[in-house]
Image (cartoon, rainbow, N blue to C red):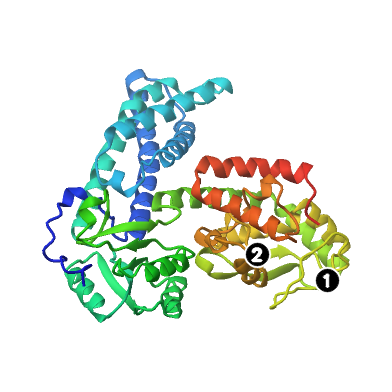
């Protein structure tokens, strides 16, 4: 088999390859949380120390509780700027990036002083304490990162990172034997599944891999099919692109030297056909935004939620909340929460979309749908990790199964968490999706959002959503 003849004898140099980071999402998230908590603790502790030092040097009695409150604001600014600057990424934590830390520290101090000046709150904090805090805080932050960097490097060197669970798509038993042998001494990779498609494409065998993907039992898929079987590769890739997991292609090693920048899967050079929509640090930033805003919104809107629940109970029979099965990230099924706005609670194989003047909509429900108040319980889905504030809108499973056959790339909407609002919704696509053109337009905007995601884009969409709720009335 030409594809594997040179697995042992390849003289390709390691510097020709990028290095694929092993499955490290859990460890990256852990160290990011440790770094964030450490930064907040150090800034607060440094502020306390600076207050005591300043008081001893000048004899001025400074209110230490006020300085601690100022330190909490300063630490929040520092963490926010650091989240937006890759400071908490695993590869950054693994090195002592003192210049980055110093830059974020001085930016946070500058913004803090500017805001304090604008709001004329200079009497609330001591400028002398801030002056003493500046070097003490920076020294503490850099020292903390030195210890964290050592811990990260030791953890990775000791192979404490859980191995990446790999599913291999091949042609024959020889494929499995060759690839397994090459990966046998690689602790960062565990072959969780192998599927042989056969020289004649048998895409029904891919269902096993897709089922493992949906069950969360694999982290990456490797297409290890000889390039002479291009029809098998092509059809396999068409199906696998619909999944949320990264998909890699094992190259023909006789020709790989003519192709630039392959990645590395343990000792194997591979080509990345599809990457995860968001990396670990991006997921962390998006999740932090979701939890903070959703939690605050639930608290502030609690009186409105209570009044809405009472109005629903007084208006018609039935539960306050309506729950319906939807497909979320990686096609995982969950139940979405909404305030009940209809006299029926459909969740079967066929679900009729709401139309203008729909007799199923209650009197209170009509107002809730037009104002989108019926969507507010989805903040609970956000807290539970089933949804995000911003993302492709999840559709009823019955609609999903119909539209996935009608619209190309529809399944790629599930590569990230669904959202309460999204790029499609703020561009006029709310309400009924009654034509293939409308569905296709929504999908294109959803995929554009996934491809161009940033924290700033999420904030922009949230702000635009408020304007849409006031000025557009497409929901009914």
Q: Nearer the viewer, residue 282 or 146?
A: 282
The location of residue 48, given as percent across then percent down, is 38, 34
Q: Which residue is denoted by mark 1 in the rendering?
A: 343
**Lateral position of residue 92 relative to residue 336, left or right:** left
Residue 9 visible within the image: yes
**Circle 2: is it few (<14), some (14-19), or many (20+) Cα within 10 Å?**
some
The location of residue 134, given as percent across then percent down, is 35, 26
Q: Residue at x 62, y 48 (%)?
A: 423
Q: Which residue is denoted by mark 2 in the rendering?
A: 395
**Lateral position of residue 367 relative to residue 129, left or right:** right
The location of residue 201, given as percent across then percent down, is 40, 77
Q: CA distance from mark 2 to mark 1?
A: 20 Å
Q: Quadrant of the C terminus?
A: bottom right
Residue 120 visible within the image: no
Image depth: mark 2 or mark 1 in front: 2
**Circle 1: is it few (<14), some (14-19), or many (20+) Cα within 10 Å?**
some
The location of residue 218, given as percent across then percent down, is 37, 70
- Please tell me the numbered disc located at residue 370: none
Q: Nearer the viewer, residue 399 or 273?
A: 273
Q: Residue at x 76, y 73 (%)?
A: 345
Quick one: SS at disc 1? loop
Quick one: SS at disc 2? loop
């Amino acid at each position: 088999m030409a594809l594997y003849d040179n697995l042992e004898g390849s003289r390709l140099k390691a510097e020709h390859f990028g290095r694929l980071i092993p499955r490290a999402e859990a460890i990256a998230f852990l160290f990011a949380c440790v770094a964030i908590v450490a930064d907040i603790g150090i800034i607060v502790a440094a502020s306390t120390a600076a207050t005591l030092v300043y008081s001893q040097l000048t004899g001025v009695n400074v209110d230490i509780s006020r300085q601690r409150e100022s330190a909490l604001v300063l630490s929040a600014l520092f963490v926010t700027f650091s989240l937006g600057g890759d400071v908490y990424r695993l590869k950054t934590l693994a090195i002592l990036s003192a210049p980055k830390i110093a830059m974020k520290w001085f930016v946070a101090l500058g913004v803090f002083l500017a805001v304090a000046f604008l709001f004329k709150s200079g009497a609330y904090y001591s400028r002398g304490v801030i002056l003493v805090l500046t070097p003490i805080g920076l020294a503490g932050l850099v020292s903390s990162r030195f210890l964290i960097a050592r811990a990260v490097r030791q953890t990775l060197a000791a192979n404490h990172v859980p191995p990446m669970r790999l599913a291999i798509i091949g042609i024959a038993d020889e494929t499995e034997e060759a690839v397994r042998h090459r990966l046998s001494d690689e602790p960062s990779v565990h072959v969780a599944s192998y599927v042989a498609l056969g020289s004649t494409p048998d895409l029904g065998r891919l269902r096993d891999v897709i089922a493992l993907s949906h069950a969360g039992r694999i982290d990456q898929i490797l297409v290890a099919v000889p390039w002479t079987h291009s029809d098998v590769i092509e059809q396999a890739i068409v199906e696998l692109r619909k999944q949320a997991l990264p998909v890699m292609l094992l190259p023909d090693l006789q020709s790989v030297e003519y192709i630039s920048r392959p990645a590395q899967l343990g000792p194997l050079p591979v080509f990345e056909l599809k990457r995860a929509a968001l990396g670990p640090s991006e997921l962390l930033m998006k999740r932090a935004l979701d939890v903070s805003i959703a939690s605050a919104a639930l608290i502030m809107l609690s009186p409105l939620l209570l009044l809405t629940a009472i109005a629903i109970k007084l208006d018609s029979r039935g539960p306050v909340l309506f729950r319906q099965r939807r497909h979320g990230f990686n096609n995982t099924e969950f139940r979405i929460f909404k305030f009940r706005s209809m006299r029926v609670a459909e969740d079967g194989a066929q679900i009729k979309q709401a139309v203008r003047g729909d007799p199923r909509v209650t009197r209170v429900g009509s107002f809730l749908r037009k104002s989108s108040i019926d969507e507010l319980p989805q903040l609970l889905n956000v807290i539970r990790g089933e949804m995000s504030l911003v993302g492709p809108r999840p559709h009823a499973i019955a609609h999903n199964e119909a539209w996935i056959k009608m619209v190309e790339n529809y399944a790629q909407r599930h590569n990230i968490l669904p959202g309460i609002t999204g790029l499609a919704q703020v561009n006029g696509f709310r309400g009924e999706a009654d034509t293939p053109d409308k569905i296709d337009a929504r999908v294109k905007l959803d995929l554009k959002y996934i491809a161009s995601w940033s924290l700033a884009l999420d904030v922009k969409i949230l702000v635009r959503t408020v304007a849409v709720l006031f000025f557009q009335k497409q929901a009914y």
